[in-house]
Amino acid sequence: MRTLTISLALIMSSTTFATELFVAPDGSDANPGTKDKPFQTIEHARESVAGINSDMTGDITVYLRGGTYVLTSSVVFGEKDSGTNGHKIIYRALPGQTPIVSGGRAVKGWVIHDKEKNIYKAPVGDLEFRQIYVNGERAVRARYPNRTSEVTLGGYLGGANVTGSKPHQLKVKPEELAGWETWGNLNEVEVVMVTHWKQKRARISGIDGGTISFQEPENTSRAMFHMEQGGTPHWYENAYEFLDTGGEFYLNTKEDVLYYIPREGEDLSTAEVIVPTVETLFDIKGTSPDDMVHDVAFEGLTFEHSNWTEPNRRGYTVMQSATHYSSAAAHFDNNTPVPGAIQLENAKHVEIRGCTVRRTGAHGVVAIRDQVSDCLIVGNYVRDTSAGGIYLLLDDEKSTGNRIEDNTVERVGTEYSNGCGILVTCTPDVSILHNEIRDVRYTGISTGWSWNDKDTAARNHDVGFNLIHHVMGLHDDGGGIYTLGKIEGMQIHGNYIHSVTRSKFAGNYGICGIYLDNGSCFKHVHDNVIENVEAAFFSGNKPNYKNVFEKNYHNCRFATILAQENTVRDNIEVKGSNWPKEAKAIMENAGPRGEYRRRK
């Protein structure tokens, strides 16, 4: 290590050309990190860079060769891993190759457990996880009733209601609980519920007739009883007794054994079965706003198999959009945000470009607290996440200048269905431009995080030229684009939103193209195209004023409710698909540009 650091430092001091290091899964950390003798681990490359970056005269590029880099813990990039003198540290895929950063571990040793039911088992030691992936496909945690739809996550049982008094309980039809006495590990069984914009998961503490009691803290959480829609759609999850169809799995934590029923065509003697073990794969964080990580870029890398097991201990009591846990008395517990596979904290001038983030246990990419400024999340492909896609969970005046552009986000909320494609809370001067959001169970793009018209750090949100379709696949009270609170200087423009239909499991709250919810004011909505949606707009929950809706094109009714204090002018309704050329230009221009365009 010492010899390597000195030799690279000499190189840096004697040339203005960028330094290059190389990493390969079949390399060795005893190597010098050259093209012919690469390092083996990203962590060692990071440590090596930290020894030569104090006085940079050019960018340092770490090239990752193709193959899988298996992590056993997060790779943490801090202040000492930053670029200096205006230059960057770049972690980049070697051209033409696909380096995969995985937080997963392969499960082997499968044997038949129940031949009649085709249930196999394998030992997993003390690993804790909530997802498994078989030949790259996400499996289903054993449940009743079985999964019948990848869009709504149904089937569901109906006719249930959460009690308003604390401790909360769920009242159900007693016949749906027939045989519950045989459910093993009852305290690990979850009941999963849908109410308007929320998904709720409560661990069961007991059953008495048709009454299900919840464990703490679920039994006092405000999220468990808040604007209920009635007849709560629900299912039961995580019992061995629910294993009855191909693609289902169950982890018995008492035996440290994983059970699985193969799908048709799967052979567990040859199949790749991966379980996640690392919560955050790349943790990019400074220690404070005064000691930030900065001038680091990640390009062309693939991230997969992140883990998140907090619901095993607290249920899932998140009030809205898979953001923060709800406490007993308040909407959010800001100390407990839902994490991401890639996470930013106290960071500036960080770039995530052209990466793939998939098969996650929670969010894809998230900026999680304190100050994150002037960061670029550009051209990435985020898909198959358990929660949301790309999130900026920030509330700080100095978290400014961030850009989320040219990304494709699809199939988010596959486990925590109230995840959004892109979400930005109270941060100023942010651009959300030219993204495509598709196959989402709740809102496509959400910004602002205040339910009144008081001043916050949110201002100048530029939401433009996005292609948003097939969202709101399960929930209600949302839309293609959804905003909350006062955001002076907000522009919503040039977006093409289409094919948004109401799920049969949703409640009766609004679903529309662009939804300006409580506290919305000073927002300019113009030159958007909205096609085949229940309504183009909703802007009826007060306070709601001084918003302008103009020059929008729509082939559905204009609005469900629009507050009279808003301005409406020069909008154009068309019949069917008879769009004028101006609307067609908006439709064609929406979504990612150039090499990042991935339209279906």
Image: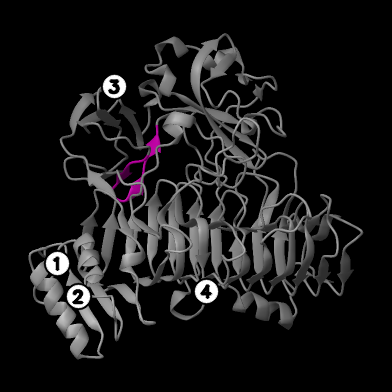
- Answer with mark 3 or mark 2, whichever residue precedes in sequence: 2
Lower sequence index among marks 4 and 3:
3
> Which residue was labeled with disc 1?
39
Q: Which of 519/241 is in front? A: 519
Q: Name which residue type carries label 1.
A: Phe
Estimate the spatial distance between the alpha carbons at disc 1 and disc 2, rounded to whole Å.
8 Å
Residue 136 within the segment the image draws in magenta: yes
Q: Give the range drawn in magenta.
A: 131-141
| Image: 548 above or below 150 | below
Residue 493 rendering spot, x and y as whole percentages: 70, 73
Contact flag, marks 1 and 3 (Cβ < 8 Å) = no
Disc 4: which residue: 592
Residue receiving disc 3: 254
Residues at circles 3 and 2 in contact by the CB criterion of under 8 Å: no
In the foreground, 86 or 45: 86
**Label 3 Cα crowd, 10 Å radius (few <14 / some 14-19 / many 20+):** few
Image coordinates for residue 352, horizontal then vertical, percent: 41, 69
Q: Which residue is drawn at 61% across and 78% down?
A: 588
Residue that numbered label 2 is attached to:
21
- Mark 2: amino acid: Leu
State the CA–CA distance, disc 2 to disc 4: 31 Å
Please name the amino acid that badge 4 sits on. Pro
Q: What element carries label 4?
A: loop
Which of the 4 quarters of the picture holds residue 320? top right
Q: In this view, does 467 lie above or below 217?
A: below
Q: Distance between the residues labelled 4 and 1?
A: 35 Å
Q: Looking at the image, is mark 4 or mark 1 earlier in the sequence?
A: 1
| Label 2 or label 4, whichever comes before in sequence order | 2
User: In this orientation, does residue 141 appear?
Assistant: yes
